[in-house]
Amino acid sequence: MALHFSQKEDTIIALATPQGVGAIAVIRLSGNNAIKLANQVFYGKDLEKQESHTIHFGTIRDEKRVIDEVLVSLFIAPKSFTKENVVEISTHGSSYIINQVIKLLVSKGARPALPGEFTQRAFLNGQFDLAQAEAVADLIHSDSEASHQAAMNQMRGGFSGEIASLRTELIHFASMIELELDFTEEDVEFASRDDLRILVEKLLRVVEQLISSFDLGNVIKNGVPTVIAGKPNAGKSTLLNALLKEEKAIVSDIAGTTRDFIEDEINIGGVIFRFTDTAGIRETTDVLEAMGVSRTHEKMKAASLILYLFDLGDTDMVEISKDINKLENLGIPFLKVANKVDKANPLFVNELKKSYPDTIFISAGKKENLETLTSRILELVNLDKFRTGNTIVTNIRHYDSLTRTRQSLLDVLTGLDEEVTNDFLAMDIRRSLHFLGEITGEITTDDLLANIFSKFCIGK
């Protein structure tokens, strides 16, 4: 829900650490009266006379009843996360203690915080822009090196800097076009149409690069959907277990054991891969197995990477070639993985190496050559942009605004080609500025803010 002005003046309170019993818990207050309210229940030093960024030991008491011994950290405005007075109370991790402290401070005038309200206040108070605020949530939920670095880059203003640069250059021309509208009768040109075209084409190149980075950003944030596909008994479940280093999937010599698919996540080189062990692909009269094969085809079409696994002792070159042609027609990156190399005929292995030199030979059962496989998996995920520090778009809202920006800029070029009047040209430029401004929050609505921050955890 959107915040009313009166709510923005409240002192808010929430548990900032995860729910559950732990060694300590941190309760956070923010607002003009945060220190004053905390001082009413804290017995130790007078908090209102202490300096910012100091920590104080004492007790929290409800009148004479001691609730807990605590450490209180002070952050005096504007030197805090929200740019308001902030107090963080470190208590023991008992849920009873946490509830008693929060209940006591609410009785003194604090209000329970809404989801994401601390970060929303930081944004509204100018601590950072909207894209950086969203990066806070991404940082909290990052579960790999890649997603962590992408979130850190965005939170530190890398993406925002790119957008701000685009808007600044476009605003200059927008103001010149608007100025011309005031002098239509004098037929004065303040903005060179050739220079405007050069600028718009330059901006389009940058916007296109950001849009194209979303595919990479999406897999960095959400994981790479990877399907292990092949005939029954090729060793798909064994390979999944070997990669996971646990017995996740049932392994059996009976063909068609996997009727549905099994999923799990694996961190490879700092990137999360969402592996799916699928039902074996073959013609079958078994209704349940046939349903599994059908789902395998669906999973393959939705994957970003396919591991085509085949048993060297149970597959010939004709069958391999036929499967590879099907995968190439599918248009999804795939790796050819030859399993059970320890039991294979050396002549067949040599033939396969000549025909398909990029084949990876492994033994999933003996966990042989899996390092080569994981290295090749990483090579297929284009992390060059990410590794060199280029801006990566990971947020679907930003992607949507960028695609709208691209269309508006294309409309500007069309207007220049057709020599439309200044008012139509100005309209398309303003639309471009509007969509860019939506990303960083220069252009926003209460509904948009409510939608974004409602997805944050309470206490952040």
Image: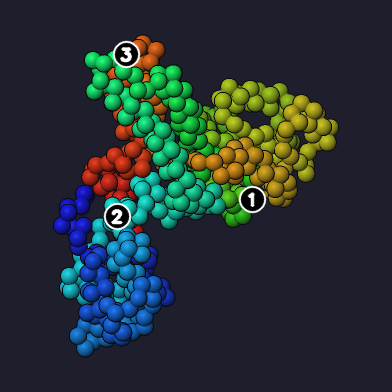
Nearer to us in this view, 437 or 97: 437
SS assignment at label 1:
helix
Residue 275 visible at all: no
Q: Are marks 3 and 2 in contact (CB under 8 Å)?
A: no
First in sequence: mark 3 vs mark 2: 2
Residue drawn at x 37%, y 31% as measured from the top left = 172
Residue drawn at x 63%, y 47% as measured from the top left = 238
The three-letter code of the residue at mark 2 reads Asn
Dot 3: within a 10 Å radius of its alpha carbon, few (fewer than 14), some, or many (20 or more) residues? few
Residue drawn at x 72%, y 50% as measured from the top left = 366
The residue pinned by badge 2 equals: 125
SS assignment at label 2:
loop
The three-letter code of the residue at mark 1 reads Ala
First in sequence: mark 3 vs mark 1: 1
Q: Position of residue 442 (x, y in %)?
A: 31, 42
The three-letter code of the residue at mark 3 reads Val
Furthest residue to the top? Answer: 418
Dot 1: within a 10 Å radius of its alpha carbon, few (fewer than 14), some, or many (20 or more) residues? some
Task: Give residue 257's quadrant in the image.
Answer: top right
Residue 124 visible at all: yes
Nearer to us in this view, 260 or 52: 52
SS assignment at label 3:
loop
The residue pinned by badge 3 equals: 420
Q: Position of residue 44 (x, y in %)?
A: 31, 86
The residue pinned by badge 1 equals: 242
372 vs 25, left or right, is: right
Q: Position of residue 94 (x, y in %)?
A: 34, 76
| Nearest-to-viewer mark from 3 and 2 | 3
